[in-house]
Amino acid sequence: MAGHSKFKNIMHRKGRADSARSKLFSKLSREITVAAKMGLPDPAMNARLRLAVNNAKAESLPKDVIERAIKKASGNDAESYDEIRYEGFGPGGVGIIVEALTDNRNRSASTVRSTFTKCGGNLGETGSVSFMWDRVGQIVYGPEAGSEDKVMEAAIEAGADDVESDEDGHTIYTAFETLSEVAAALEAALGAAKSTQHAWKPKALTPLSGDAVGTLMKLIETLEDDDDIQNVYSNADIAAEDLEKLAG
């Protein structure tokens, strides 16, 4: 995960901000609609919807867009989205998990498979990669939340399992079942998080260096650009010098 989080930061520095933001808003809206359709259209009564709305607010999604996404779930013309998980291997044997929300399973499967193939990877069966990962809660704060010690103390008090801090901020991990409770306790101590979600955390990282790093970045970037794809996780552990080359 550490390797991938660095990847995301590099990609955001590459001048793709506007189109990336448009796609992000679209994906946040889709998650809100799906969450509202699966439960009550009230965030106070629907934990998944509450997380989706909080994440949307953290990314400055306008209030009217949030409300429209919730209303869309109860409309007769609301699209029906399937949640699908794809698993495969990228360059250098790096494990990749892809989460999709799609209204066309065949289109998504074809796109994901061809993207893996074009970028030196191969799509596997469900379970071929995820057994090497843990399903966890993940709460992300920016560096402005405080020092590593302050965030660690707040996380321990809140009942979190682990904290990873670097110059880009803090990532706090919780048990899958306790995400909402830990997030609420952290919000009281540190303020609103940048994102709160269920995520995949690799049990071990796969070292990657040289040309394979650029190929993996292209694979992840292409997947994340697809409207059907909500999240992409990799277990790449990338050497600092290779990260610096990509950022240059």
Image: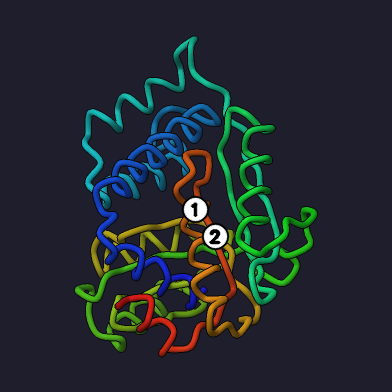
Disc 2 is placed on an element classified as helix
Residue at horizontal 31 percent and vertical 62 percent from the top: 12
Residue wearing tag 2 = 219
Quarter that holds the C terminus: bottom left
Label 2, residues with CA under 10 Å away: few <14, some 14-19, many ≥20: many
Rendering coords of residue 186 (x, y %): 34, 67
Q: Position of residue 144 (x, y in %)?
A: 19, 74
Residue 183: image quadrant is bottom left
Establish if 178 lies above or below 151.
above
> Residue 162 or 90: which is nearer the viewer?
90
Q: Quadrant of residue 216?
A: bottom right
Q: Residue drawn at (57%, 23%), measured in percent from left and top?
A: 80
Dot label at residue 173: none
Which element type, helix, strand or loop, lies under badge 1?
A: helix
The percent position of residue 92, horizontal first and vertical second, equals 66, 77
Q: Residue furthest top?
A: 76
The amino acid pointed to by label 2 is: Leu
State the residue position of label 1.
222
Image point 27% across, 70% down: which residue? 142
Q: Is residue 98 above or below residue 11?
A: above
The residue carrying pointer 1 sits among few (fewer than 14), some (14 to 19) or many (20 or more) residues within 10 Å by Cα, namely: some
Q: Tell me which amino acid carries mark 1.
A: Thr
Residues at discs 2 and 1 in contact (Cβ within 8 Å): yes
Q: Quadrant of residue 177?
A: bottom right
